[in-house]
Amino acid sequence: MPMRFSGQRVVITGAAGVYGRELSAAFAAEGARLLLADRSEADLAAAVPAGLAPDRVTLHAADLATDTGIDSLIAAAIAGGAPDVLVNNAGIYPFIPLMEVTPAEYDRILGVNTRAPFRLMQGIGRAMAEAGRGAIVNVTSSAAEVIRGNGVPYGASKCALEYLTRAFAIELGPRGVRVNSARPPFAEGSALVSMPPGYAEAVVARALLGRGRRAGAFADAVLFLCSDAADYITGAVLDVGGGGAINRRDGAATRARS
């Protein structure tokens, strides 16, 4: 079968993380040329898909909490023309009780999770629009709907990013650029900080399908949204969380007649 992204240029932020590595491997397997961005070049080097030829990958170390880092990534991404795909995957979600969040912590979470994608969609999206084609996927979260008291700034950042997804879909759609969001399932190791006891088990237990995530399921969803198979989809949110974000009331009483 032909590779869906053969020769296409794909930019992935947060490429050294759990989902960044999964996305990088999936796009590489489909023939893409990768620009991988994260804060540490050493971490990026360790995340390069096995066997990928050096001429098919560029590593770009940048702190997306800073304008310098964002500007450098935009410049690298559009050097030589617009990329075909941008995946805004970088994100941080520390576990901090709502009343203990400091202004600096709030600003950093919103800076990386919302402000950086906003600026990247402006800079790279403009180049895509000039080229008349492109696909952008913003990695959001079920936290945009499900409130947990020790993750409010994170949820607010993802709520805002889904709003921005729709706004940029409206702005860029007439010029051939599609913009969508994808919500990943929970993955151990995707946070930079330790999780509260029992958190991982509770998230998996809430999924409706009776099991944890399948490795590669999220990458499959993102590649679909970036592919020609989704050429009439824009402004959408695709939740790959096993139904765990559906608002519901659990318990035997919800199944009984009154």
Image (cartoon, helix red, strand yellow):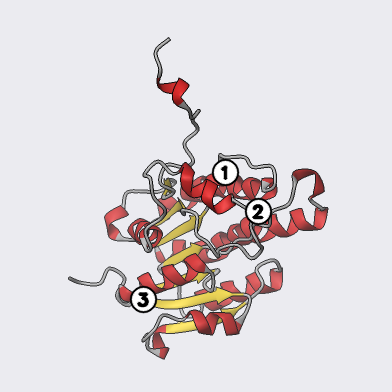
Q: Residues within 10 Å of mark 1 (few under 14, many from 20)?
A: some
- Judging by the rendered image, the residue that carries numbered circle 1 is 144
Picture disc at residue 196: 2
Q: Residues within 10 Å of mark 3 (few under 14, many from 20)?
A: many
- Judging by the rendered image, the residue that carries numbered circle 3 is 28
Measure the alpha-carbon separation of dots 3 and 1.
30 Å
Give SS at disc 1.
Answer: helix
Amino acid of disc 2: Pro
Quadrant location, the C terminus: top left
Query: Picture coordinates of residue 247 (x, y %)?
Result: 50, 33
Instruction: Look at the image and tell me whether residue 83 can be seen.
Output: no
Measure the alpha-carbon separation of dots 3 and 2.
35 Å
Mark earlier in primary sequence (3, 1): 3
Mark earlier in primary sequence (3, 2): 3
Query: Picture coordinates of residue 197 (x, y %)?
Result: 63, 53
Query: Picture coordinates of residue 93 (x, y %)?
Result: 64, 57
Q: Say above or below: 81 vs 209.
A: below
Left or right of 18, for residue 115: right
Amino acid of disc 1: Ala
Mark earlier in primary sequence (1, 2): 1
Q: Say above or below: 37 vs 165.
A: below
Q: Residue at x 37, y 58 (%)?
A: 214
Quadrant location, the N terminus: bottom left
Q: Residue at x 65, y 68 (%)?
A: 64
Query: Picture coordinates of residue 235 (x, y %)?
Result: 44, 46
Mark 1 and mark 2 in contact? Answer it, CB < 8 Å.
Answer: no
The foreground one among 47 and 37 is: 47
